[in-house]
Image (spheres, helix red, strand yellow):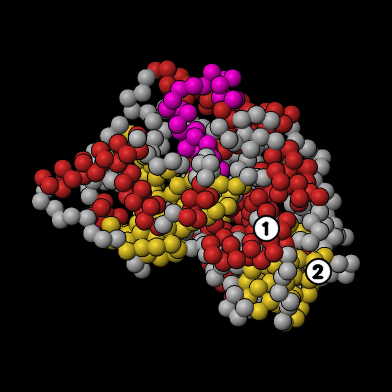
Amino acid sequence: MQRRQFLTAATSAATALLSAGCEPAPRALQGGFAGVDLERGHRLRDLLAGGQLPAPAVLRRAQVVVAGGGVAGLAAARALRLAGVDDFVLLEQEDEAGGNSRGGQVAGIACPLGAHYLPLPGDDAREVQDLLEELGLRRRVAGRWQYEERHLCHSPQERLFFEGEWHEGLLPVQGVGAATLAQYRHFAAQVAALGKAARFTMPALKSFDVKRPLAPIHQALDAMLFDDWLTLQGLDDPHLRWYLGYCCRDDYGAGTARVSAWAGIHYFASRHGFHAPGEAAPEEREAVLTWPEGNGWLTRRLAEPLRAGGQLRTGCSVLRITEGRHGVEVDALHHATGNVERWQARRCVVALPVFMAARVLPSPPAFLQEAARRLRWSPWLVANIHIDAPLQDRPGAAPAWDNVLYQDANPGGLGYVNAGHQRLEPGQLLAGPTVLSYYQALGDQPQGREQLATQPWTHWANAALATLGVPHPDLARRATGVEIARYGHAMAIPVPGQLAFLSKIGLQPIPSKRKQLSNGERMPWLPTPATARLAFAHADWSGYSVFEEAFTRGHAAGGVAAG
């Protein structure tokens, strides 16, 4: 009833505004599903469940097979190339590599289908820094690192729709009481203190190794829910709780009642900290890299040399990975031909989600079986809304790249980013057609995955238009089409106990005489699981999905596979 009342109120408000201006009625929407092919994924699931897989029709050979073309798989392929290994193949189920970081187009306008930004990497993310330098995004000038300004998020960066107006930033500040501000300061002090007492790194796998196992503070935080930790600290202010819930859903796909306290603190302590109103935040640490197509800009550049070299094979679902004494055999279904191809190789980088990796290995190692049993995944959707002209706006802060609604009416709603925000032409942010990419994390919804699979695209499109119609009353008139990207298992959720389990798996000797990774870094341990012939590389092995985690693990696995 509350949702119905909200939709009725929103529709009435919009209708009143339209009538006052004698505006035309909302147009019929064009749209549908885009991005991940759920039917292809479900076909693979049914094949694996049936047990009788088709016999291979073609036999091929390579030195290394990379199974999975998300960020980790692309990073592994790059590491192989850097090590001088060109005899490899990357098998990707979808028609384009990139995983959750792919980009697309709506009405000819580039927009993200998933991850839409990359924070400037710190020194713990050396592998990501090297990539950005290779792509021309980062260079040293007069002894200092500088980033290419065209690719940094343009101002204004973010705003919040709060109490009927737009406000700068995402933390509710204007009009809140002294008690709220005091809790902001208390949480900021806690984050700073914990950050000094233990290492919170990005990527998280750099926080520990065989000589520096999981710190007692990490263990304590990992053992409890973020909600419970906040309650113990006396942090019960609804504005602070809303903001922290938004942050957790944004990075982890679920809110404070599901993620661990370690994850809640890590979100801030590993990057930019938490800054209460009046506290200065270092500008260079708040900056992010972004593009109209989101992180699809990065994954397409990682895929380009593979496509040119013939190593990238899209539309290929991995069915079976068999590890032997002298090598591996990988069977993959080529969807265009319907044939199963068998690849024989010396080693394989398994850059698949954990639940898929456990299914395609006939005898998965114990750590993989246990990880598949323990991990939980959040479903996501991205609604890309094409508008043919600038929208009416409520009072307050100017249109920004990231636009968030306080207490969004849609469960797990995270607001939208404007694909036109990075345009370089003067005044183009407020002129001409663009695409608004609305994000919704469904990790807190009991039937979220089932809803994604069964509800029509119009269900998600209408919900997004209704909630965004509150700050933009003319959205229904301006929208010409909506495309919905669905991810049934978008990201692993860092629940309590997960960090302790996954960190133990990663702390093992490199299964090779070669101790040097492809970027020249020497490690006596491999920061990602492996066996004699297989190296596992995916963001799942960090317990949550961000670019730095997936790329670093993929880079390490590729370096080992090349050894």
Q: How busy is the neighbourhood of tag 2: few (under 14 within 10 Å), some, or many (20 plus)? A: many
Splitting the image into 4 quarters, where does residue 149 fall?
A: bottom left
The residue positioned 76% from the left and 51% from the top of the image is 368
Where residue 39 appears, as percent x and y from the top left, is: 54, 65
- Disc 1 residue type (three-letter): Met
State the residue in front, 128 or 72: 72
Q: Earlier in the sequence, mark 2 or mark 1?
A: 2
Left or right: 304 with respect to 81?
Answer: left
| Front label number (2 vs 1) | 1
Expressed as whole percent of the image width and height from the top left, the position of residue 65 reads 73, 69
Residue at screen point 44% across, 41% down: 411
Residue density around tag 1, few if under 14, some if 14–19, many if 20 or more, within 10 Å = some
Residue 239 in sight = yes
Say what secondary structure mark 2 lies in: strand
What's the CA distance linking mark 2 and mark 1? Answer: 17 Å
**Quadrant showing the N terminus:** top left
The image position of residue 125, as x and y in percent, is: 64, 49
Task: Identify which residue is drawn at 47% across, 25% down.
Answer: 184
Q: Which amino acid type is shown beneath numbered disc 2?
A: Val
Q: What label does residue 356 carry, if any?
A: 1
Residue 85 on the magenta span: no
Give coordinates of residue 40: x percent, y percent: 57, 66
Span colored in magenta: 228-255
Residue 191, picture quadrant: top right
Q: Between residues 254 and 450, which one lies in front from this camera angle?
A: 450
Secondary structure beneath dot 1 equals helix
Disc ID at residue 328: 2
Residue at horizontal 82 percent and vertical 40 percent from the top: 211
